[in-house]
Amino acid sequence: MLDQLNRLARRILLLMARGTIALVDDTKGVQTLQVRLNPLELIPDVPRYAEYGFTSNPPAGSQSLIAFKNGDRNDGFVIATSNAKYRMTALASGEIAIHDNKGQSVYLSASGIVVNGGGNPITLTNAPEVIADTPLLKCKGDILDNYETNTRTVAGMREVANSHVHPINDVQTGGSTINTQPPTQQE
């Protein structure tokens, strides 16, 4: 009886384990990880399950939490991963962030949504239109529309518009032509 209880206790202890991710295979339908549980135990091809619609490729050295069916180390699956080195901190209660190890993030803060490109371009694709339904759209930098064919920014076009003149034909005797003054309307 004591032997059976010891076996049961050992299986209960083996139901969960923490490990360090050594390698990720993201080429299959279900991502698999190679996880080191201790200096002597390296488990290959452990499936990793994630919430629908969310996916990631955790960098080597990330921590993982593994569940083992009936405490069997050959039948486990990763249920969570984390990397304290890259985790965003100081979020207020109820706030959410999606982030990576390059400084890119989407932060749903209490005061609004912040998209941080981490110094990289942000690209919106495959949208027939983008609607900004807001009473005021602010842009800190310049704007370039039709960027593949247009070489002028909005600031450049504003400079041309503010300094252009129009010829006025035949306003003086003798057929003279003069130009208007640049616009005087303030921005």
Image: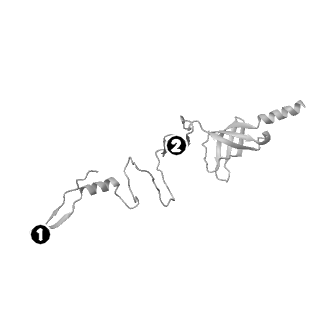
Label ID, residue 46? none
Q: Quadrant of residue 182?
A: bottom left
Q: Amino acid at mark 1?
A: Gly
The correct choice, above or below, for 149 with respect to 107 in the image is below
Q: In the rendered structure, which disc, 1 or 2, sits on the residue that comes first in sequence?
A: 2
Relative to residue 120, is residue 20 depicted above or below? above
Question: Under tag 1, what secondary structure?
Answer: loop
How far across and how far down the image is residue 159, in percent? Answer: 28, 54
**Residue found 65% across the figure and 47% down from its top:** 51
**What kind of residue is marked 2?**
Tyr
For label 2, the residue is 107
Q: Is residue 90 left or right of residue 173?
A: right
Q: Position of residue 185 (x, y in %)?
A: 25, 53
Residue 52, position as x, y percentages in the image: 64, 50
Point out the residue furthest to the right here.
1
Q: Residue furthest front?
A: 135
Looking at the image, residue 138 lies above or below residue 173: above
Q: Which residue corresponds to mark 1?
A: 175
Q: Are marks 1 and 2 in contact (CB under 8 Å)?
A: no
Furthest residue toward left: 174
Residue sitting nearer the eye, 55 or 112? 112
Out of 170 and 122, give the one closest to the viewer.
170
- Taking the image as shown, residue 185 lies to the left or right of residue 72, namely left
Q: In terms of secondary structure, where does tag 2 sit?
A: strand
Q: Residues within 10 Å of mark 1 (few under 14, many from 20)?
A: few
Q: Position of residue 124 (x, y in %)?
A: 49, 55
Quarter holding the N terminus? top right
- Identify which residue, 21 or 96, lies in the foreground: 96
